[in-house]
Image (tube, grey):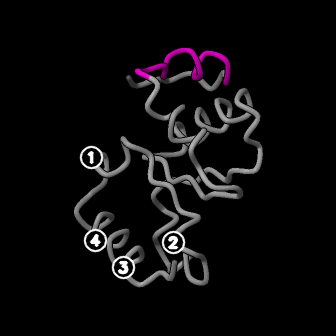
Amino acid sequence: MTTVTTDPNKIYQEHRGDGTTTKQIKASPEKAIFVCPNQTCAHYSKLLAHDLGRQDIEFVSTSFFENNRWRGLLKSRIVIDHATRKNMTPQQRDEMDFALKVMHD
């Protein structure tokens, strides 16, 4: 669902789905980097994580994979939101796949 509001509470309510992101957040390793399809989804996920007591997670958009921002991080800390891949351009998918391939566990 697309939203045009900047009110965090309204964004949170409008993006509710089937609970898949909630499950991913709960299962994320400590101090995970959670990659979301875009900044709006990252903001929503951060609000959700806060409600779940997971303030340790960093939420980023797919731009995380640009310009080698991921270098030096462990692959085991990266969590890809279930909706991310289908919302990426082919170039973004290639950048993400490359990063995940060369990252160390």
Q: Which residues are magenta?
A: 8-18
Please tell me how crowded label 2 is: few (under 14), some (14-19), or many (20+) other residues with Cα within 10 Å.
Answer: some
Q: Earlier in the sequence, mark 1 or mark 4?
A: 1
Residue 25: % across, % down: 58, 41
Q: Main secondary structure of the magenta part?
A: helix
Kind of residue at disc 2: Lys
Disc 4: which residue: 94
Disc 3: which residue: 101
Closest to the camera, between mark 1 and mark 2, is 2
Say left or right for 44 vs 65.
right
Whole-Å distance between the Cαs marked 1 and 4? 13 Å
Question: Which residue is depicted at the point 36% across and 79% down?
Answer: 101
Disc 1: which residue: 86
Please tell me how crowded label 4 is: few (under 14), some (14-19), or many (20+) other residues with Cα within 10 Å.
Answer: few
Placement of 41 over or under 11, stated as above or below: below
Placement of 104 over or under 66, stated as above or below: below
In magenta stretch: residue 15 = yes
Cβ atoms under marks 4 and 3 closer than 8 Å: no
Q: Earlier in the sequence, mark 1 or mark 2?
A: 2
Disc 2: which residue: 75
Q: Earlier in the sequence, mark 2 or mark 3?
A: 2
